[in-house]
Amino acid sequence: MAQATSPPDLTRETAEPTARRYSVDAAGLGRWRAGAFAAPALLLIAIFLVFPALWVLYLGLTDYRLTGTAAADPKVVGLDNFLSALGEPTFWNSTWLTVQFVLGSAVIGQVGLGFAIAWLLRDKRGPLKRIVEGLVILAWILPSAVVSFLWVALLDADGGTLNALLGTGDYAWLLEHPMLSIIVFNTWRGTAFSMMLYGAALGNVPPSHLESARLAGASGWQQLRDVVFPHIKGHILTNLLLISLWTFNDFTPFMITAGGPDGKSEVLAVHVYKVALQSGQLGYGAAVSTVILLINLVVAVFYLRLLRSKK
């Protein structure tokens, strides 16, 4: 008696090539067509990000200047600019001031104030919430030149608004407390982003979890520590990464204090401007910019690894 044979599994035979095709390109476009769609974006990235970064790196290896013979015929000096920057006390002074600026105005100021406003307004309704949010966001969307002028007028020693309110005469706030002035300024200006991000994050915390914690007798701090923060830890780290990098590279303090007095508020962004454009040492300034880029990459990698480890 002939033994029956099972028919070929056509479904399997047709599924395997399909799976292989989609494993290469999930959209089914094929590599060439997918590359054509991505080409404009990659071209813009190359023009505005990759090429400028490589050009700055090249300039950092030369003695290029804005004027003089070095402007017409720059020479390659290797790592001399980098070694000079790392051995220059003004560079380390600017680095330390930048660390203070980031920690004070971004990590402590914007994160703390932004979360506090979002937490206090989480259950509020009506015009009060809209007014507070509108005022905070207004400080964020105004042009840098406008807000800088407002703060100079506020802190000016001669007829400044703050002296008039406090009755402190002609006290020179920008001269006596330059770093504190730009830290408070940047906190006031940048809090809106943290407030909006935390406001959206707090909306994702299940109210039932907070209610259960209250019924269990948890204090306000225990609710934040054990319920709220575990739910929004990804948002916290993302916010810290973004505002740290923004603050690290912020040039707005130059409009408030111009790096003075005597370099007491000369953060790295202002330091690069002074050595590259005011002093004309483009090669040296490019080397410092490259060092700043490397610091940014280290900070970004640290935050990203921390974010992955917390998931």
Image (tube, rainbow, N blue to C red):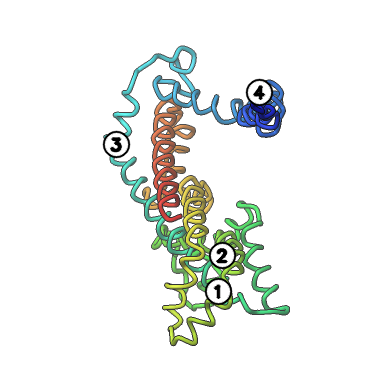
- Tell me which label, 1 or 3, sits earlier in the chain: 3
Residue type indicated by callout 3: Glu
Q: Quadrant of the N terminus?
A: top right
Helix, strand or loop at mark 2: helix
Q: Nearer the viewer, mark 1 or mark 3?
A: 1
* Relative side of 36 to 254, left or right: right
Residue type indicated by callout 2: Tyr
Mark 2 and mark 1 residues within 8 Å of each other at the beta carbon: yes
Q: Residue at x 46, y 59 (%)?
A: 105
- C-alpha distance separating marks 1 and 3: 44 Å
Residue type indicated by callout 1: Trp
Q: Is 252 placed above or below 218 here?
A: above
Q: Residue at x 46, y 52 (%)?
A: 244
**Residue occupied by mark 1:** 119
- C-alpha distance separating marks 4 and 2: 40 Å
Please tell me the numbered disc located at residue 88: 3
- Tell me which label, 2 or 3, sits earlier in the chain: 3
* Relative side of 179 to 186, left or right: left
